[in-house]
Amino acid sequence: MTLTSSVQSEVLDLLASRPLVVLTGAGLSTDSGIPDYRGPGAPTRAPMTYQEFVGSAEAQQRYWARSHLGWQRMGQALPNDGHRALAALDPLMLITQNVDGLHEAAGSRRMVALHGRVADVVCLTCRSTSSRAELERVLDELNPQWLERHGWVATRPDGDVDLDETSDFVVPTCECGGVLKPDVVFFGENVPADRVTRCYAAVEALGTGGALLVAGSSLTVMSGLRFVKRAAQHGTPVVIVNRGATRGDPLASYKLEVGCSEFLGELAAASRHLPPVATPGR
């Protein structure tokens, strides 16, 4: 059910008194200046798929030309009150669909970055990983004046921007000659199985005495929705905090149309006044 503010304290009491697994989405990072894909008023977006990226050098050129611009903003983003509140709550597991690294920057410990981190780069041939910051330095050297020429373009989610003309952008390769890709899960690419297994285990351990909190996700893709389904199957209460409808709403015990940062701050404050929550199985 969707709640009004008059009964929001009921949800806070429920969550503050139980072991938690928290699943976050792009809506949690909007207060840090990173736009989301599907929030109210968000334009329709068509992110590049994995198949497109690996399909041609032109697609890779287009991706990196745009991402190089977007990184100047995403790479400077700072954790907001919602990130800091979750770090203070320190749930049994924090599962994030975000790739911005802001949960880590805020100090969250027990977490799974389901889709990876945009601050890391992987070679699709030798699978070696490297720093995005170092790649950005190389991109600057290979494409002088690129930022000055195109720095005005609008930012899109995941560090992308709106830019059509990218044919003169120079993209480096790995030392082995392989294609470089941000170490994140693109649309059309599978989440690594070990991450999914860890998340399922954390959700299943909650049982009927814990709760799954979803913050800032429309749950449009199965990547996150599967954990809501698994919680519901095990009788675990599900609370969804998101502005706008989600695919998980029919499975939710409670649905709140409130801001993530505001709500998580209230939850952290409520939790501080209670004794430590027992961990399932202990």
Image (tube, rainbow, N blue to C red):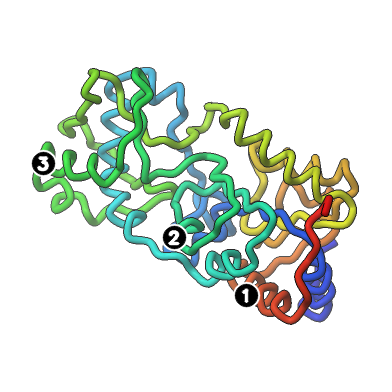
Mark positioned earlier in the residue sequence (3 or 1): 3
Q: CA distance from mark 1 to mark 2?
A: 17 Å
Image quarter of residue 274: bottom right
- Residue 88 sits above or below residue 54 on the image: below
Question: Viewed as shown, does residue 144 lie left or right of 167?
Answer: left
Q: Residues within 10 Å of mark 3 (few under 14, many from 20)?
A: few
Residue occupied by mark 3 = 141
Q: Are marks 1 and 2 in contact (CB under 8 Å)?
A: no
Question: Viewed as shown, does residue 274 lie left or right of 85?
Answer: right
- Residue 280 coordinates in the image, percent (x, y): 82, 53
Q: Amino acid at mark 1?
A: Gly
Q: Nearer the viewer, mark 1 or mark 2?
A: 2
Q: Quadrant of the C terminus?
A: bottom right
- Residue 67 coordinates in the image, percent (x, y): 31, 43
- Residue 242 coordinates in the image, percent (x, y): 67, 60
In percent of the image, x 68 and y 34: which residue is there? 197
- Residue 143 sits above or below residue 58 on the image: below
Q: CA distance from mark 3 to mark 1?
A: 43 Å
Residue occupied by mark 2 = 105
